[in-house]
Amino acid sequence: MLSPCSFHFPYLFLCHIICYSPPAQNYYYYTIQLPPPPPPPNFLSFFSMELRTTSLLLQSFYYYYSLPPRFLNLNKPSSLSITTNLLRSLSHKVDQADQQHSFPIAAGARDIRMVPNCIGEGLSCASTSGSACSCDDSNGGDERMNGNADTRFSDNSQMIRDCDKLIEIFIADESELTDWRKLLVNNNTKWSHIRLDFFRHCRDRADNENDPLMKNRMLLLGNKLKEIDADIQRHNQLIEMIKRTPSEITDIVSRNRKDFTKDFFVHLHTVVESYNDNPKAQTDLAKLRNTCLAAVKVHDTATESNEALIAAELNFQDIINSPMDASDQKIDNFAEKGQCFDPESVAHWLRLCYDVEEVGRVHTIVLKCFRGSSTYVDNNLICSYLRLGKLAKARKVFDGMTIRDTVTWTAIIDGYLKYNLDDEAFELFHASIKHGVQPNSKMFVCFMNLCCKRVDLALGKQIHACILKSNWRNLIVDSAIVNFYSKCGEITSAFRTFDRMEKRDVICWTTIITACSQHGLGHEALLMLSQMLGDGYFPNEYTICAGLKACGENKALKYGTQLHGSIIKKICKSDVFIGTGLIDMYAKCGEIVSSKKVFDRMRVRNTATWTSIISGYVRNGFSEEALNFFRVMKRKKVYVNKLTVVCVLMACGTIKSSLIGREVHAQKIKSIVHTNMYIESTLVWFYCRCKEYSHALNVLKHMPFRDVVSWTAIISGCARLGLETEALEFLREMIEEGVLPNSYTYSSALKACAKLEAPMQGKLIHSNASKTPALFNVFVNSALIYMYAKCGYIADAFQVFDTMPERNLVSWKAMILGYARNGHCRKALKLMYRMRAEGFVVDDYILATVLTACGGIDCGDIDWDLESSSHDLHSS
């Protein structure tokens, strides 16, 4: 193939030939000297003749050798660069002759609207070369080679002319670089085809330029346009990145903030204006530009805020880490120089404080550097003091505030609630209403918590009505309302509020499940848990604990085991609270071995864990083992709370271990465990179980407050110890103090009346019990039957028995034995038959007592056949 030829004008014509030998697969480089042609009439005709000669020589070599495609990868001789420059120089001189006709450069060449037309004229042949190379005809190789060579030369010539035209325009145009940017942006597609050739041509023209001034201008032009082109290419790449992922503009700005410069937005604006013929694309690009501007503004604001916080944190650390005198001096210097910190910086300082001393120093800065009271700063001070347990200091800041907003009142009321100062919180609540504070959702939650702690149902309903009228309902507020109604015992209202919630989350589900569990509605709690799982919500630790409590109360061992399996499968995070709930659940279901296994596998145990295992062993009748756990607990120096003491005293009372119980009582007195009503009531029960009535009476007299449990403990203890008169006297004192007896109290008092055979007092107790729900209790009714039967009022006993809504073994036994001991043997035998018919087992004691009492009665008269009756019962 013929390489570009070099001319040693006008006498010598050299051709550089590169040949390919297929057998050897080698390339050979030849230089052929041709005889000089005749003198041309002019320069242009000479150039055309040389070109035709070169084409003929190319055809002759093409017949003998066929060049593979990789020939194009050969490096040309270094001497050929001179030939190329000379060709371009000659082509430029040729085109100058007809430049006045094809492209006039007028005085208005600076007008940017004229420039795109000139670029468009010169790039019309860009697709010609591409189409010329698509021919795959196997014949006519000489014509094809000749055509390709002519086309390539035509393309190069056209490209050179286009570059020269642009160079002349750019040199003649003295406008700013912005106009040049517009030119390249508006003709981006066409400029991309000639940009690399343009830069090379500028360099070549500069190399061949004799005028130094023009040479420098050419070099400066090439460098400036290369710089502008590089900026345009970088901006276009950034725009394409944003177009691909418009939803991640914020992240793109964060990663490439330095690229979003003023020049970029000017370029983007120019691109938007270039889409005049496509309004939709122009609108989309305009929206993209506005989004980028907004993202940059947000990023810069956040950066400035972070920088301010970092500077404030450095100042804070400098002040805090300095000695007291130096710290005060620095604070005074800030005050003298008038360097007042902004509220956001001070609030950031307060969040960094970990003790009261640091908060106090920041408080000093606030007093010295802030001339007036700032509500935002004072609110942060109140929250910081409350977080560190300094309620008095927080109240002092609150009292010194001239302007208080909703956040201020909410913070101080919530602080008093956290320290169980309900009355003070209630006074602040009234003060906020008096000052006309407009509550928000957080303040309403605080109010509902206040009503919940005070168990103030009326006030809570009023606040609930305000929430509904002001439309402040949301997930958190509704959950607080559900919790309020459940704590006040209004479980129906809690369910009604829960059912009206538009949206629910794990917290509100946990609230209603816990409410059901705490009110003894274990079955409903498990149903709600199943519905929660069915709705696709995953329970948290508190939900699982509430579910385990419901399983324990309902003896739902199967469901509790399933929950245990889900915990093992990591449906939620297993912690010490869930482990404690599992121990309690298994113990209440009678699976004390499983409870012990869970306890042994726990790596972390707290006081509640030890108390649960001790309580489980006591509940299942293993009091000795429970006391052994208590000894290990004390040996490991685990804190003993009030519930632990109650469980240990119950274990001691069950096995009548007076000595250990006395030790626990002494430790309670000496320790920091303060007087507790439940501990005192358990002590009364314990001493009565150990037949130490004087100690029980002493404990009861020293109790500051006696509830129904305390009175019931002493009444049942006296009845068990044979002190029936004292038991009835305690019942009278109990009623005089305004304490209402419960079913256990009535049952114990009725037993005392039965032993005393005091029917009149028994009837009085029956009359009082009939006015309370205790009358429907099976134990109270059984005690009434026993009392009436023991006193000889068998008709009254049977009336009570016949009107009972449900009966247990004790009820049947009391009525049957009452008949037998009062001489009604036939009725006793008939009632025994009825008892067996209803599915109750007649034990040997009932059978022996009835048969002994009815020894003179012919049992055949009532057709009493144990085997046949049993057979009839099973067959039925």
Image (cartoon, grey):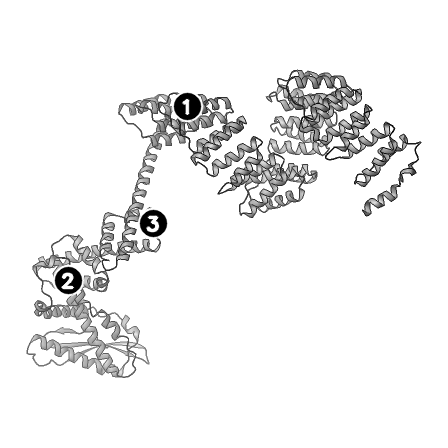
Q: Residues within 10 Å of mark 3 (few under 14, many from 20)?
A: some
Q: Position of residue 763 (x, y in %)?
A: 75, 22
Alpha-carbon span between mark 1 and mark 3: 49 Å
Nearer the observer, disc 1 or disc 2? 1
Amino acid type, residue under disc 3 in the picture: Ile
Residue 854 against residue 150 in the figure, above or below: above
Nearer the observer, disc 1 or disc 3? 1
Label 3 sits on a secondary structure element that is: helix
Q: Residue at x 73, y 18 (%)?
A: 728
Q: Nearer the viewer, residue 288 or 727?
A: 727
* Mark toward the start of the polypeptide (1 vs 2): 2
Nearer the observer, disc 2 or disc 3? 3
Q: Nearer the viewer, residue 202 or 509?
A: 509
Residue at which label 3 appears: 249
Label 2 sits on a secondary structure element that is: helix
Q: Is residue 183 toward the left or the right of residue 639 in the image? A: left
